[in-house]
Image (spheres, grey):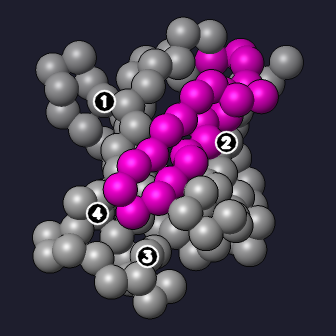
Amino acid sequence: MMGRLTTHVLDTANGCPGKAIYIKLFSVAEDGSQKLLKTAITNDDGRVDSPMLEGEELVGGTYILEFDAGDYYRGRGIKLADPAFLDIVPIRFGVADAGTHYHVPLLLSPYGYSTYRGS
């Protein structure tokens, strides 16, 4: 089985997919330094059109997905505090078995979020 990393966003405040959310994917080195690997924007279904990483690109280690929640809600006309309570939402996670599927969804509102390892 070829490993892959996928994600999607659900806007729990509005009961809809998180459309047009800018995402950055970083790898994290043992010394804590970060390297930008990929950027993406969610589609109308709140998903990224292709895996963030796939096959040999996905290796064991630590990663961070950053979601631009503040710009998403501002774009929807939601008035946020200045500074916004949640502007950039980082999810730091580990990949122990690069040969499997890691799905990292984000359930998002202007004042909270959650995630889990999906399928």
Chain part drawn in magenta: 98-119
Q: Secondary structure at mark 3?
A: helix
Q: Distance of mark 3 from mark 4, alpha carbons?
A: 9 Å
What amino acid type is highlighted by mark number 3?
Answer: Tyr
Q: Position of residue 46 (x, y in %)?
A: 68, 63
- 112 is within the stretch colored magenta: yes
Q: Secondary structure at mark 4?
A: loop
Q: Distance of mark 4 from mark 1, alpha carbons?
A: 21 Å
Location of the C terminus by quadrant is top right
Furthest-right residue in this view? 1
Q: Position of residue 29 (x, y in %)?
A: 27, 24
Mark 4 highlights which residue? 87
Q: Distance of mark 1 from mark 3, alpha carbons?
A: 28 Å
Q: Position of residue 89 (x, y in %)?
A: 35, 51
Nearer the observer: mark 2 or 3; the answer is 3
Location of the N terminus by quadrant is top right
- 46 is within the stretch colored magenta: no
Mark 1 highlights which residue? 28
Q: Distance of mark 2 from mark 3, alpha carbons?
A: 22 Å
Q: Secondary structure at mark 1?
A: strand
Q: Distance of mark 4 from mark 2, alpha carbons?
A: 22 Å
Q: Earlier in the sequence, mark 2 or mark 1?
A: 2
Mark 3 highlights which residue? 73
